[in-house]
Every structure is written in structure tokens, then in C-alpha cells.
Amino acid sequence: MGQSSHFGDNRLFRQLMENFGTITMNNLYCKIYINTALPRTLLVNFIAKTCHGTVTLRTISSTLFQIDVITNEEADPRLATSSEDGFLYYPYYLEIDPQNSAVESNLYVTAIAGLLRSFWEQGATAVASCDFEEELPRFVSKDQQTVTVVSTLPNRPAGIQLSLPVSGVSQSLAS
Amino acid sequence: MKSIPQGLNEAQFNTLSKAVTQKANSMGFGDDIVVQGSRVTGTAKPNSDIDLAIRLSQEQFDDFLKQSFKTPNPGSAKEKTMLHAIQTGKIQAGEAGLSSFRRQLERELGMEVDLSVILKQGTFDNGPVLPLWR
């Protein structure tokens, strides 16, 4: 007996199997810590442009996300670079939730990965803290420049921490 | 005369108090909720946020921490975030499942809101505070 006779619809079966054991709607919240010298207004604008979102106060709203850009009151430049958990002291963090319950989880996770990649491409450091850290890809430098890609999990492509030379971050993101 | 945080009027603070207290009650937190920071000390700038803290006992805080973070993978960024929350006695809005509610408050008030769950007598339970109206 084939899969379609059990589930009635092969597409539904594939969708169930793709999502099985990975992501459920109630754990899609994601925090991303960001290390950049950029003023928050410019960071908000950059994210809004990247996500094709609209801005209200510090919240960016797009078809997939609601993203709050929060100034980290515990930010500490010394701790941010000197300790293993330095990302906790980055100047900003994002609080990201799905826009609504209809957002498809795999699409959402892919978009989070894209957002991380956009920070990386602009030279900012970004660390994701969420239930699906292991689902997020590792990024590889296109031009083989020196890039630090650190997983916070041993031997796993998770908890992405990307470091590029910080110079040029302000000009790139602000332009 | 009841005190009001700097920059809010009586109607705004009344609405805020009711909304946050109702939300906290629905989560089983009780009503020990305070305003902290510059809106209490009178040093707020026009674009300052309003800091709201739901204060929990050690037992309540520990239970809610487990509920919020569940069991993160060892070594993950989420685990480090959880350990930091334990160390500082503060669970931020996102991990507390309050970010959506906070956005509603921000839209209502037209100002940024910092809403967190803190441990009574913990690192962040300090400075002058103003209880929400009951």
C-alpha cells in the first residue's frame, strides 16, 4: 500500500514528513544578537529593507515576521569580544516571531537564515538563539576571505556566529 | 494622590496597569508589577522607553524559567541565554512569550516598552519603582 492511500494526499504526506521532528509553530521565536556600531535607526532601516517590511517604532513587520530591534541594556564592548558567551553583550538583539499562525515554518526558518546571511555579508556579527539553531546553515565566504564561522554546538552547524572585518560596516549598512 | 510615570497621563497609566495586570494574572504571576528606570526617576527623554517588570519569587521564577526555555541543547546559544537569565534573574519579553503583547502596548502608548520577568531581590530588582495601579 502506498503512502497516498494512508494519507490520501502525497503532498500532505511530504509536508508532514518535512516538518516531522523539526519545527512546530509554538517554538518559532528567535532571538538574534547583533554586533555592529551602527545606530539603531539605521539598523532598523536596513532590516526593513532586507525583509521588505514596514517600520513602527522599533518593530519591523513583513509577510513572514514581526521583528523588534532592541537596544541591549547589558551591552559591554569588552565582554562582547573577550568571553565565549560574548554575544550576550552585543549592542542589539532582535526578537523575531512569525507574523501569524499561517506562516509556514520551513519558509520562516529559511528567511531567518537569509537575514543572518545579510548581516554577515555586511560585516556584522550575528548569533541566533532559538530552538532551531541546528536548522540554520553555515555560511561560507564567497571570495575565500578570512571568515570565522563558529558553531556554538560542538560538531554541529548550529548557533551561528559569523565574524567579518568590522571596517566598512557603517558605510555598507547605511548606504 | 497616585503617582504616574513621567510622560504618561492618568488614562494611559490606568490602561497600561489594567492590561499588564490582566496579562500577568492570566499567566499565573500575580500582580507584583512595577515601573522602573527613567520614567520613575523623572529623567526620561521623549524617546525613552518605559521599563515594566513582573516580579516573581524564586520558586515562581525557577518554574517559569523551565517553562520558557525548556531543555535547550547543551552548548547552544539558547542554553547560554538561559544560563544568563538564571545568573541575572531576568527573563526578557521574547523568551517569556510576551513580545507580541509588548508590541500591542507600544502601539497603544506610542512609546517603546521594555517588559520583562524578574526575580525578586535579583540583580534587576533595584532602584526606585512605581507599582502599577490596582
Image (spheres, coloured by chain):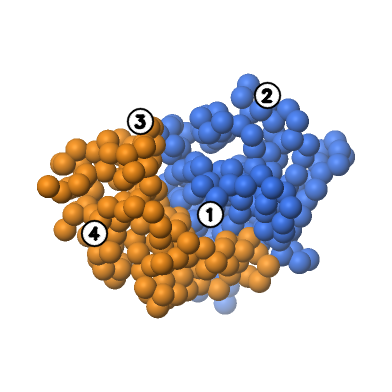
| Mark 1 and mark 2 residues within 8 Å of each other at the beta carbon | no
Chain drawn orange, letter?
Answer: B
Chain letter behind tag 3: B
Q: Quadrant of the C terminus of chain A?
A: top right
Name the secondary structure under disc 3: loop
Identified by mark 1, the residue type is Cys
The residue tagged 3 is B46
Task: Give percent across and percent down for residue B106.
Answer: 33, 41
The residue tagged 2 is A171
> Which residue occupies 56% across, 43% down?
A92
The residue tagged 4 is B21
Determine crowd level at label 1: few under 14, some 14-19, many 20+ residues with C-alpha closer than 10 A.
many
Asked if badges 4 and 1 are on one and the same chain, I answer no
Above or below, comparing residue B127 to residue A1 in the picture: above
Chain letter behind tag 4: B
Q: Colour of chain A?
A: blue
Identified by mark 4, the residue type is Thr
| Residue A30: mark in rendering | 1
| Mark 3 and mark 4 residues within 8 Å of each other at the beta carbon | no
